[in-house]
Image (cartoon, rainbow, N blue to C red):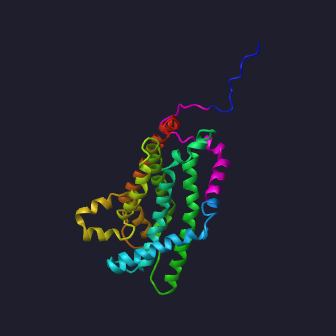
Amino acid sequence: MTEPNDNWLYEITPKRKLIDLNFKEIWRYRDLLFLFVKRDIVTVYKQTILGPLWYFIQPLFTSVIFTLVFNNIANIPTGEVPAFLFNLTGITAWNYFSQCLTGTSSTFTANAGIFGKVYFPRAIMPLKTVISNLFKFGIQLFILIIFYCYYLFNGFELSPNSNLLLFPIYVLMMALLGLGAGMTISALTTKYRDLTVLVGFATTLLMYISAVPYPLSEVSKEVPDLVWLVKYNPLAQIIEGFRYMVLDTGTFTTAGFLYTLGVSVVMFLFGLIVFNKTEKNFIDTV
């Protein structure tokens, strides 16, 4: 009598560690991850009139509106930096975070159909959102470089500083914050569907307390009683740091940078814990 072979190739089990991204399994499904990323990039604007031009139009129009409202009407100063370029820099950074947040916040509800039919690492879905948004971020960064060169050739004194070496870390912090917050919200929406409506509204409000349309220094001057609300907002630190390394304007502190990095990692780990816990039985409630 032959003994049964217990050396399984794959083992699917609901028992997971609290903090477990399971990189080994995700690597085995890397082809599926790349397929989802490609699908997001190709099909998102496939049936639109302007197609990929929306990648260019959205940040440009937003920057124009911000320049008219906040700089021309409200007279918020941007120092020696052109107001349009100042706003475009902040919006470029903000867009990547907000797209990661909104894209991952509906992971369970938007993919319930495919999750209920076939197995693959569920973390692939929020990861593909973060990766595909890097493509959009790259396009908007290219637009920023074009206008940066335009103003530079027209006599404006612009120069990045040595903090530009921290650029990959800033992108990573935006991804971790968006991924962590998005996975947390996605887990909550399996029980509380009205949170999906709240996400869009809350994201818009969050932008205005993240120093996107104004310098961080202006908050201390105009509303000193509320400066803590912006100062301790990690997104405001990211936007300010992004502008500082690209435009050499604003403020940068090592303490603020380390604080933001720490909050980003904690937010990601918290989101991962909630995501893994919800993954076990979400299909019964979604």
Q: Nearer the viewer, residue 143 or 254?
A: 143
What residue is shown at x 65% (from left), y 57% (from top)? 38
Relative image position of residue 3 (x, y in whole percent): 73, 16
Is residue 23 visible to the viewer in this orientation of the structure? no
Above or below for 209 versus 30: below
Relative image position of residue 251 (x, y in whole percent): 36, 68
Relative image position of residue 241 (x, y in whole percent): 41, 65
Above or below for 119 versus 110: above
Relative image position of residue 135 (x, y in whole percent): 59, 62
What residue is shown at x 44% (from left), y 51% (from top)? 196
Please identify the residue farthest to the right as the structure is shown: 1
Tell me the quadrant of the picture where the N terminus can be found: top right
Is residue 124 visible to the viewer in this orientation of the structure? yes
Magenta run includes residue 248: no
State the extent of the magenta-drawn residues as a range: 12-40
Magenta run includes residue 24: yes
What residue is shown at x 47% (from left), y 65% (from top)? 93
What residue is shown at x 38% (from left), y 60% (from top)? 206
Q: Nearer the viewer, residue 279 or 243?
A: 279
Q: Viewed as shown, does residue 2 lie left or right of 77?
A: right
Residue 5, by quadrant, is: top right
